[in-house]
Image: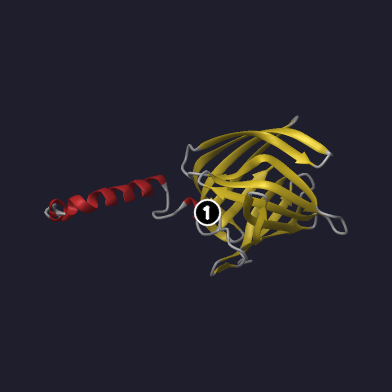
Amino acid sequence: MDAIQNRPIWRIIAPTFLFGLFLLALGIPSGAADEDFFPWKKGDSWVYDTLNKQKNKHFDMKVMMEGPWNENDQSGMIMTQKDERGTMREFQTKNDKGFFIYKLGLSKALTPEVDTRFTPAVPRLIFPLAPGTKVHWEGRLKVRVVMDKAIIFDGEVIGWDDVTVPAGKFHCIKLHYHEKRGSDIIDEDAWYAEGVGQVKYDGGQYVKELKSYTVGSAVKADPQ
């Protein structure tokens, strides 16, 4: 303790100060945790302007954290997505390597929900959220007796990017995913902002841009 007390104050604070400068140089918000980029509490909600590229048609997608789920030895949060196509429920799990999708529940009006399972759970957001982080995943997509398809998934944290969407301008971390589902190949880009969640998505035949959100006590409406 005496050794610490006798050190000049600049020698004590310099390492912390220099690390803060290092984070600023990378564009990383000081004090931000990986989990801050994916709000995961019941009631958190988002609205996205969604574009079907093939049809050049826009529609709203409403997303909400519905609440917790438990099944066998698995547990997590259900994230519900609703739009004109129907409803999809993501049964998400979380660990120190990121957020994962355990299964999906898909339904349309007057149609019972059908479970789609990933074995094992497929990555949704990978940790740490630092440029250069990569993940390789291999598993299967199962839909009852209808489908049992092999999937190869590669993800990478690309870097920091300023993104402007209907909800405003955000400093985001960008991720790229490359998936091979049987003979289908899908490339996806997703942008996440601290304290907000997913701000933009561009993959397959759809583009999503954030219009408004309610996360904790923060409410952001589309200025339009």
Which residue sits furthest top?
183
Question: x, y percentage for residue 32?
Answer: 44, 54
Could you tell me which residue is drawn at 70 percent across and 58 percent down? Answer: 80
Relative horizontal placement of residue 60, taking residue 216 as reference (left or right): right
Please name whichever residue, 3 or 81, is drawn nearer the observer in this view of the structure: 3
> In the rendered view, does 17 fall on the left or right side of 122?
left
- Residue 43 higher or lower than 74, as above or below: below
- In the current view of this chain or complex, which residue is farthest to the right? 110
**Secondary element at tag 1:** helix
Counting from the top left corner in percent of width and height, residue 124 is at: 61, 45
Image quarter for residue 68? bottom right
Q: Name the amino acid, label 1.
A: Phe
Q: Residue at x 76, y 34 (%)?
A: 149
**Front-most of residues 156 and 7:** 7
Question: Residue sitting at 73 percent across and 43 percent down?
Answer: 117
Specify the quadrant that holds the N terminus: bottom left
Residue at (59%, 53%) from the top-left corner?
198
Image quadrant where residue 110 sits: bottom right
Q: Is residue 31 left or right of residue 85?
A: left
Vertical position of residue 160 compared to residue 216: above or below: above
What residue would you read off at disc 1?
37
Residue 13: x and y in percent read 23, 53
Assess disc 1: are there few (<14), some (14-19) or many (≥20) residues with their C-alpha within 10 Å of its C-alpha: many
> In x, y percent, where is residue 3?
13, 51
Q: Among all residues in the image, which is located at the extreme front?
A: 72
Indicate the colouring scheme: secondary structure
Return the residue nearer the eye: 47 or 223. Answer: 47
Quarter of the image with the C terminus is bottom right
